[in-house]
């Protein structure tokens, strides 16, 4: 029975490819990859000549089944890789894996690089429990609602973001979950690897000051503060017009001046007049 090997590849530094991963990639019948051009670069570095087959998010719903059936028909072992990191973790591949399981093909892991645990490991945050969200919605309202749910759950989480939207994400975190602790890692394992750690507000300031922020891929570790909930303060009850007229009288106005004052303040003339008549009657009754 053929085997499918799910192989983690480097997320930056090519020396992170494990000896076992190299042996597997060299020995299988074909490598299913997200982008053949990217995987070809890896193969050239390590002198691998295994045939490459494209299996990505746009075709794996049909290609995965075809590849799994090919493995059976030709008794071929295969490897599944992504452009960088561990397949099926915020990357395509799970449909191919699923097709293999459904056909009785054994699926084995060749562990290695993955951005999420790498970012957590340098964050200095308690990761005994954490949640992976991948990329949050691009729509501002949907993203804010997602962040509110993250804050309500209160669990450490990992988020991926592109360099072109990372500032928007940080601004949304500051607005929705102010005071949250974040560890923002960029270009993990690469030459210009950088991790910024602190409150979301502090990290955002440092990112805005960096002209190279819009370069590299980002992995954020977020320890969320509780979402800000605007207090629904109960507005004081509207003071009845007769009471407002009495107030004007106490302040030294006569009845006509009080009516004019309230009308100028935007109250309807007829309503003010009726209120004034009520006040006049009360005053006359008290005099009697």
Image (cartoon, helix red, strand yellow):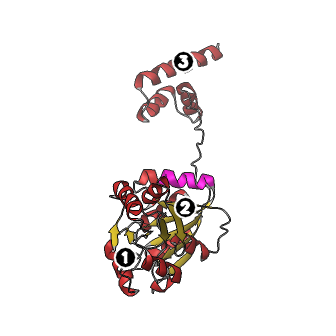
User: Left of 128 or right of it: where is 236?
Assistant: left
Q: Which residue is mark 1?
A: 39
Q: Does residue 150 belong to the magenta stretch?
A: yes
x then y, percent, for residue 50: 37, 77
Marker disc for residue 132: 2
Residue 158 visible to an observer of this rendering: yes
In whole angstroms, how far apart are the C-alphas of marks 2 and 3? 67 Å
Q: Secondary structure at mark 3?
A: helix
Q: Does residue 15 belong to the magenta stretch?
A: no
Disc 2 packing (10 Å; few <14; some 14–19; many ≥20):
some
Name the quadrant of the C terminus: top right
In whole angstroms, how far apart are the C-alphas of marks 3 and 1? 87 Å
Residue 209 visible to an observer of this rendering: no
Disc 3 packing (10 Å; few <14; some 14–19; many ≥20):
some
Which residue is farthest left?
37
Marker disc for residue 227: none
x then y, percent, for residue 227: 58, 54
**Of labels 2 and 3, the one closer to you:** 2
In this rendering, the answer to whether 6 lies above or below 279 is below
Prevailing SS of the magenta stretch: helix
What residue appears at the point 34 percent right and 54 percent down from the top-left corner?
62
What residue appears at the point 36 percent right and 63 percent down from the top-left corner?
56
Q: Secondary structure at mark 1?
A: helix
Of residues 49 and 186, the one drawn nearer to the viewer in this rendering: 49
In whole angstroms, how far apart are the C-alphas of marks 1 and 2? 25 Å
Residue extent of the magenta highlight: 144-153
Of residues 80 and 133, the one drawn nearer to the viewer in this rendering: 80
**Of labels 1 and 2, the one closer to you:** 1
* First in sequence: mark 2 vs mark 3: 2
- Tag 2–tag 3 contact (CB < 8 Å): no
Q: Secondary structure at mark 2?
A: strand
Q: Which residue is mark 3?
A: 278
């Amino acid at each position: 029975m053929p085997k499918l090997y799910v192989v983690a590849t480097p997320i930056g530094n090519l020396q992170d490819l494990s000896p076992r991963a190299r042996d597997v990639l060299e020995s299988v019948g074909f490598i299913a990859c997200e982008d053949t051009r990217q995987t070809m670069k890896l193969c050239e570095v390590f002198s691998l000549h295994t045939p490459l087959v494209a299996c990505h998010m746009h075709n794996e719903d049909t290609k995965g089944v075809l590849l799994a059936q090919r493995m059976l028909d030709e008794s071929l072992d295969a490897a599944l890789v992504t452009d960088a990191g561990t397949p099926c973790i915020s990357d395509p591949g799970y449909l191919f894996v699923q097709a293999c399981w459904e056909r009785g093909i054994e699926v084995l892991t060749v562990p290695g690089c993955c951005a999420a645990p790498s970012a957590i490991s340098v964050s200095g945050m308690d990761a005994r429990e954490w949640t992976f969200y991948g990329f949050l919605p691009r729509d501002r309202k949907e993203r804010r609602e997602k962040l509110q749910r993250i804050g309500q759950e209160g669990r450490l989480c990992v988020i991926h973001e592109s360099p072109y939207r990372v500032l928007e994400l940080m601004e949304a975190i500051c607005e929705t979950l102010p005071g949250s602790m974040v560890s923002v890692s960029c270009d993990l394992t690469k030459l210009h690897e950088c991790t910024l750690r602190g409150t979301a507000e502090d990290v955002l300031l440092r990112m805005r000051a960096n002209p190279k922020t819009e370069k590299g891929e980002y992995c954020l570790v977020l320890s969320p503060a509780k979402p800000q909930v605007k207090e629904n303060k109960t507005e004081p009850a509207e003071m009845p017009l007769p009471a407002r007229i009495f107030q004007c009288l106490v302040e030294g106005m006569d009845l006509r001046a009080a009516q004019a004052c309230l009308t100028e303040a935007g109250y309807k003339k007829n309503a003010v007049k009726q209120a004034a008549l009520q006040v006049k009657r009360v005053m006359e009754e008290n005099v009697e």
